[in-house]
Image: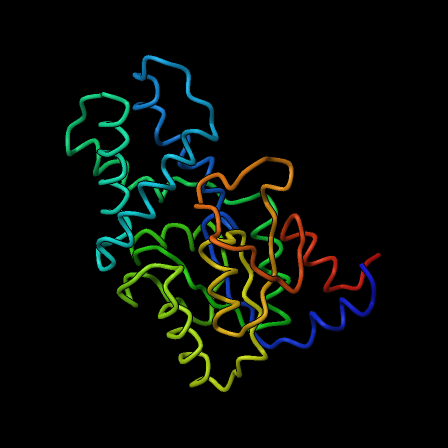
Amino acid sequence: MNKECSNRLRSFKALTFDVYGTLIDWETGISNALRPLIDQVSRDLSRDEILETHARYESYQQALTPSKLYQDVLAVVYRRLAEQWQINVTWEECLRYGQSVREWPVFSDSVESLRYLKDHYRLFVLSNVDNESFAWSNEKLGVSFDGIYSAEDIGSYKPQDRNFDFMIDQLATLGIKKDEILHTAESMFHDHLPANRAGIASCHIYRRSKQDGYGATMPPTSRPHYDFRFTSMAALVKAHQGAT
C-alpha cells in the first residue's frame, strides 16, 4: 500500500465500525447456531443458501419491527427458517438461537487490529444489535470503544438513514466532524450505501473476497462507493503503517 493511502488513512479522527461481519465472524456463528435446525432438513443446504435465506428473513423482520431487540429478531428468523424447511420447533428453541450472538467468534485479526487502531483513532460502534448481545461480543473484542450506538438505542436498524444520522450527531457533540469519520464495514447493504447517503467516507473490509455473493447480508440495491478496500482488518492496519 502506497504512502499516499497511508497518509489519507491518518487524516481521520474516528473509525466507526459495523461489528457483525466485520469484527465478529457472524457467518460462522450463524451457521454453527443453526446446526440443530439444519440437521433436520431433508435435503442438503449449501452454506450460502442458508446464509442468504437467513439474510432475507432478518432484513424483512428488522424493517417490519424496527424497535424489536436483535436477539428477538433472530428468534423470529429461526421460526421462519423452520417453517420454510418444514421443521417443528418450540419457541424456547427460537429464543435459544436468538441468544446465540454471545457464542459468535471474533475474526482472528480483530483483537490485535483494534488494539493498534485504538492508539491512533477514537473508535465507535454502529451496529444492528441489542446492548446485551453486544456486551458479550465486546468482551471478546477486548477494546474499550469511545461510543456504542446500537439498534436498540436508536430504535431502528441499518440501512435506515436515521441510524447514521444519529451516529453523526453523537460524534458532533464530541467534536468530530463528518469529514473526520471513516465508517469501516463489510456490508454493502447495511453500511456502505447509507454511508454514501450520509456523506461520510467508508472503508470496505472485504471478508468475503474469496466467496461469491453477499452471504448473510442482502444484496445492495445499487453499487455503493467506498474510499478504501481491504480484505482484512490486519490489511487495514498495514496500510495505516505505510507498509508496501
Q: Position of residue 196 (x, y in %)?
A: 53, 67
Question: Residue most toward the left?
Answer: 91
Asked whether, in this view, residue 177 is left or right of residue 44, the answer is right
Asked whether, in this view, residue 199 is left or right of residue 78, the answer is right
Position of the C terminus, as image quadrant, is bottom right
Vertical comparison of 152 with 84: above or below: below
Q: Which quarter of the figure has residue 6?
A: bottom right
Vertical comparison of 193 with 109: above or below: below
Vertical comparison of 159 with 99: above or below: below
Q: Position of residue 158 (x, y in %)?
A: 38, 59
Residue drawn at the location 34% of the way across and 55% of the way down: 129
Question: Residue most toward the front?
Answer: 222
Q: Position of residue 40 (x, y in %)?
A: 30, 16
Residue drawn at the location 68% of the way across and 77% of the way down: 11
Q: In front: 1, or 55?
A: 55
Position of the N terminus, as image quadrant, is bottom right
Q: How many marks?
A: 0
Residue drawn at the location 58% of the way across and 79% of the way down: 179
Residue drawn at the location 35% of the way across and 44% of the way down: 102
Q: In front: 219, or 38?
A: 219
Asked whether, in this view, residue 232 is left or right of residue 220, the answer is right
Q: Position of residue 65 (x, y in %)?
A: 21, 54
Q: In front: 221, or 54?
A: 221
